[in-house]
Every structure is written in structure tokens, then in C-alpha cells.
Image (cartoon, grey):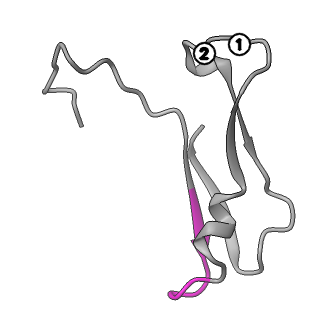
Amino acid sequence: MFEHDRSAARGEMATRGLYVFKHDSKLGNAHAHDLFDRISVKKKPDAAVPRAFTDYQVSINEDNLPQGVELIRRVG
């Protein structure tokens, strides 16, 4: 998206994770907030001042997904 629009004020950006919840029903099979809560990002204890993506732990709870919901990892 920003490949042809570099700015000194904006640093480099990179996609680190893209997670898609696919529902069997057009209207959805679960509430969005319940699904979003399954993905958490926390600072690692040994990173006093986080400076890189590797200073964080990404956790995804795939246990007991609601019926009719599938988690697809596009990136990450």
C-alpha cells in the first residue's frame, strides 16, 4: 500500500499477521468480539523496552471454536 509513497515521517511497515474468521452463515455464527478476544499480543517479560516485533508474543486460542466458524491464517 505504501510501496510507492515513502515519507521521512513514516517508518517501514510490514504485515506480521492476518487472521480471518470464516463463518458458514452470511450473518455470522459468532459475535466478532468473542472471536477477536481469541487473538492476543503481549510484551515478552524479558523485553523491558520493546523495540521489535520479536519482543512480543502473539497467542491464538483455536480451542473450541464456535460451530460453523473456521480460523484461516493468511499471514503469520
The foreground one among 75 and 33 is: 33
Q: Is residue 60 magenta?
A: no
SS state under label 2:
loop
Amino acid type at mark 1: Ala
SS state under label 1:
loop
| Location of the C terminus (image quadrant) | top right
Q: How many marks?
A: 2
Report which quarter residue 6 is drawn in. Answer: top left
Callout 2 crowding tier (Cα within 10 Å): few <14, some 14–19, many ≥20: few
Instruction: Please name the residue shown 66% across and 18% down the image.
Output: 55
Residues drawn in magenta: 20-28
Instruction: Please name the residue shown 77% across and 80% down the image.
Output: 67
Identity of the residue furthest to the right in this view: 64
Give coordinates of residue 17: x percent, y percent.
Answer: 55, 39
Q: Is residue 23 magenta?
A: yes
Cβ atoms at labels 2 and 1 below 8 Å apart: yes
Residue 59, placed above or below residue 6 = below
Q: In the drawing, what numbered circle is on residue 47?
A: 1
Amino acid type at mark 2: Pro
Identity of the residue furthest to the front in this view: 48
Residue 59, placed above or below residue 64 = above
Question: Which residue position holds label 2?
Answer: 50
